[in-house]
Image (tube, rainbow, N blue to C red):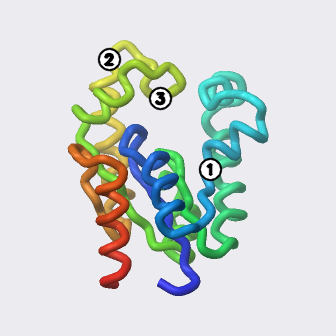
Amino acid sequence: MKNKNIALIGFMGSGKTLVAKKLGELFDWEVISIDALIIEKEGKAIGDIFAESGQSYFRQLEKDFLKQAVERQSVIIDGGGGIILDEANRTLLKEKCVVIHLSASADVIYERIKDETHRPLVNVDDPKTKIEELLEKRQSFYAQADYVIKTDHKNPEAVCQEIKEMIQND
């Protein structure tokens, strides 16, 4: 795993942000949250960016920040839930990172995010159905990860331990 970063991909609510923070502590690596960088640059919430500038604008920001992040060394990249929608992003991630898909079921994702209002893609009348639809659409992209870890009934520490073991055995 020399000279490679770790990129966490997965649907919103799969645990990327919490696991990235814990993994950063475990490996003593910097954590780069693409969503946090976008929020900081724009000075507004992701939902507001979507509403005011559109999803395509947000996805371009995401791409720009990812390009910068993968050039660093020994970093944990917390890619937003849709970062894998762009082919160039998927290529960059595969070339420069060990890509780990944190997978969670639609039921668990719904339970984790049902009270959150900052997630524009599921601020709809039937968020559970929307989650299922988006998971289905993105599955082939998530399947391109180097590793998959199911996070449904695991705490972030357990997921980090699993990642550490996977990487050490690689």
Q: Indicate left or right for 21 with 75 as reference.
A: left
From the image, state whether disc 3 or disc 1 is nearer to you: 1
Residue drawn 54% across and 78% down? 4
Crowd band around label 3 with a 10 angstrom C-alpha radius: few (<14), some (14–19), many (20+): some
Spatial separation of the CA atoms under disc 3 and disc 1: 17 Å
Q: Which residue has dot 3 on it?
A: 121
Q: Label 2 sits on what residue type?
A: Asp
* Near-viewer residue (19 or 50): 19
Q: Position of residue 44 (x, y in %)?
A: 72, 28
Q: Position of residue 135 (x, y in %)?
A: 32, 42
- Which numbered disc flags the more N-terminal residue, 3 or 1? 1
Q: Label 3 sits on what residue type?
A: Leu
- Which numbered disc flags the more N-terminal residue, 1 or 2? 1
Spatial separation of the CA atoms under disc 3 and disc 2: 11 Å
Q: Indicate left or right for 121 with 74 as reference.
A: left
Image quadrant holding the C terminus, namely: bottom left
Q: Indicate left or right for 105 with 100 as reference.
A: left
Residue 66, above or below 82: below
Q: Which residue has dot 1 on it?
A: 34
Asked whether the beta carbons under mark 3 and mark 2 sit within 8 Å of each other, the answer is no
Residue drawn 61% across and 35% down? 55
Q: Position of residue 57 (x, y in %)?
A: 69, 39
Badge 2 element: loop
Q: Label 1 sits on what residue type?
A: Ile
Q: Indicate left or right for 110 with 42 as reference.
A: left
Crowd band around label 1 with a 10 angstrom C-alpha radius: few (<14), some (14–19), many (20+): many
Residue 93, above or below 33: below
Q: Which mark is residue 126?
A: 2
